[in-house]
Image: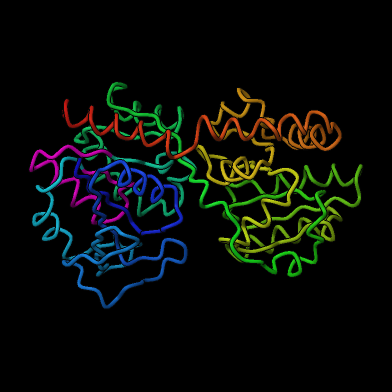
């Protein structure tokens, strides 16, 4: 197959890129259309490239469209339409990663006009909690584009049952929805260089008695819930440490630090800021339990990453039934008592902890590995090409 992948920003260590690399390894031709936006910082990159001529990124032919307006104003790219018309008929199928940026809308519209089948991945952007982020901007996009775009799509890629329901609520037929979990490439989980993350946090690397919260530090991640639950754990174990890794709004971070102080656990809580690459892997490798209490997350990558590093998890409602199926962690209600009790259950029951730790590998190998997941992508593409709407 000749596949065109549309994304807001290229990250070569992402699960999306792992899927594309595996598809290429399986003999498919992959071309990427991206933008000159850094999806971590929101800043611009590759300013000097010609956005109508491809460059090579990690073996992939990639078009880097320039934004002429910031994303907050729609992310308009004046060359998106020209590029779409120039290249889109060369491809068997188009896969669009989300759509809250102008090039995605243009390529979906052009694909529909040219009768080229296209698939959309929402990646949890339809969940209420995520729609509230940049609410006015998304309301404008939703009012003008979203429903028409989704109903014109040949298929919808879902990462979980909650997302499938969001699609059906918008009128998508179940037979046009394909559930595929985010994929893991084990080559991304090899620590290549020593890091200073433990000295920065004033932690002993050999200390396995610390807990980790990993992800963006924003209100929907319910870090307050984690801190309140952790304060109850500290009453039983005064030496335990909680590491909160991730960047966020400074005023919200200040609120969390003040809460930790008011709960008298500030000496046991370390705010690591944004951690990437080897630093993140170093933290994951040495932690005891990953805690994830976000609202509106569907198959969060932080949880998959922890499981890949053989770390049991305690999570709330993140649409990951396989955790209980494989007995690789504990799923709890999003309350202080439920969360603290779930964490204590793993801390205090070493036998249960070891069983869950051993089960993480089976879960990852059977449910997340890119070598297996990519077969589902191939089936999704083949079915969509053979039976377009």
Q: Residue at horizontal 59%, vertical 62%?
A: 192
Camera-side residue of 238 and 180: 180
Q: Residue at horizontal 14%, vertical 44%?
A: 111
Image position of 182 (left or right of 334): left
Camera-side residue of 286 and 158: 286
| Residue 227 to residue 344: above or below | below
Residue 133 coordinates in the image, percent (x, y) = 46, 51
Image position of 30 (left or right of 115): right
Q: Residue at horizontal 64%, vertical 42%?
A: 292
Hey, which residue is sitting farthest bottom in the picture? 48
For residue 118: magenta? yes
Camera-side residue of 168 and 351: 351
Residue 257 coordinates in the image, percent (x, y) = 74, 61
Res 247 → quadrant: bottom right
Name the quarter where the N terminus is drawn. Answer: top left
Res 101 → quadrant: bottom left
Residue 385 coordinates in the image, percent (x, y) = 18, 32
Res 82 → quadrant: bottom left
| Residue 147 to residue 136: above or below | above
Residue 335 coordinates in the image, percent (x, y) = 71, 35
Which colouring convention does the figure follow?
rainbow
Name the quarter where the C terminus is drawn. Answer: top left
Image position of 293 (left or right of 164): right
Q: State which region is magenta.
A: 94-119
For the image shown, how many numbered marks are present on the structure? 0
For residue 54: magenta? no
């Amino acid at each position: 197959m000749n596949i065109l992948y549309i994304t807001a920003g290229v990250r070569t260590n992402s699960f999306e890129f792992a899927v594309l690399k595996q598809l290429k390894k399986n003999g498919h031709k992959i071309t990427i259309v991206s933008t000159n936006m850094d999806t971590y910082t929101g800043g611009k990159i590759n300013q000097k490239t010609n956005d109508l001529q491809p460059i090579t990124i990690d073996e992939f032919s990639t078009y880097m469209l320039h934004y002429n307006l910031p994303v907050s104003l729609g992310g308009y790219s004046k060359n998106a339409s020209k590029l779409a018309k120039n290249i889109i008929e060369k491809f068997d199928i188009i896969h669009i990663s989300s759509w809250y940026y102008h090039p995605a809308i243009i390529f979906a519209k052009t694909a529909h006009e040219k009768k080229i089948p296209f698939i959309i991945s929402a990646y949890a952007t339809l969940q209420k909690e995520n729609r509230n982020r940049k609410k006015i901007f998304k309301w404008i996009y939703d009012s003008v584009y979203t429903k028409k775009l989704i109903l014109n799509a040949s298929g919808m890629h879902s990462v979980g049952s909650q997302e499938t329901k969001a699609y059906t609520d918008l009128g998508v037929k179940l037979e046009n929805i394909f559930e595929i979990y985010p994929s893991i490439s084990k080559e991304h989980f090899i620590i290549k260089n020593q890091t200073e993350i433990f000295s920065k946090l004033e932690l002993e690397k050999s200390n396995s008695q610390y807990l980790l919260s990993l992800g963006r530090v924003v209100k929907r991640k319910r870090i307050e819930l984690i801190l309140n639950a952790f304060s109850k754990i500290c009453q039983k174990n005064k030496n335990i440490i909680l590491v909160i890794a991730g960047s966020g709004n400074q005023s919200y971070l200040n609120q969390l630090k003040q809460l930790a102080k008011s709960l008298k656990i500030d000496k046991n809580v370390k705010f690591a800021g944004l951690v990437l690459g080897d630093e993140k892997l170093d933290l994951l490798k040495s932690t005891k339990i990953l805690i994830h209490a976000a609202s509106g997350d569907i198959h969060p990558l932080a949880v998959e990453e922890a499981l890949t590093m053989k770390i049991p998890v305690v999570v709330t409602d993140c649409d990951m039934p396989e955790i209980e199926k494989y007995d690789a962690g504990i799923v709890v209600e999003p309350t202080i008592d439920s969360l603290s009790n779930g964490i204590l259950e793993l801390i205090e029951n070493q036998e249960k902890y070891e069983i869950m730790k051993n089960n993480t590998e089976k879960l990852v190998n059977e449910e997340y590995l890119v070598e297996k997941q990519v077969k589902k992508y191939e089936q999704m593409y083949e079915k969509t090409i053979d039976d377009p709407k």
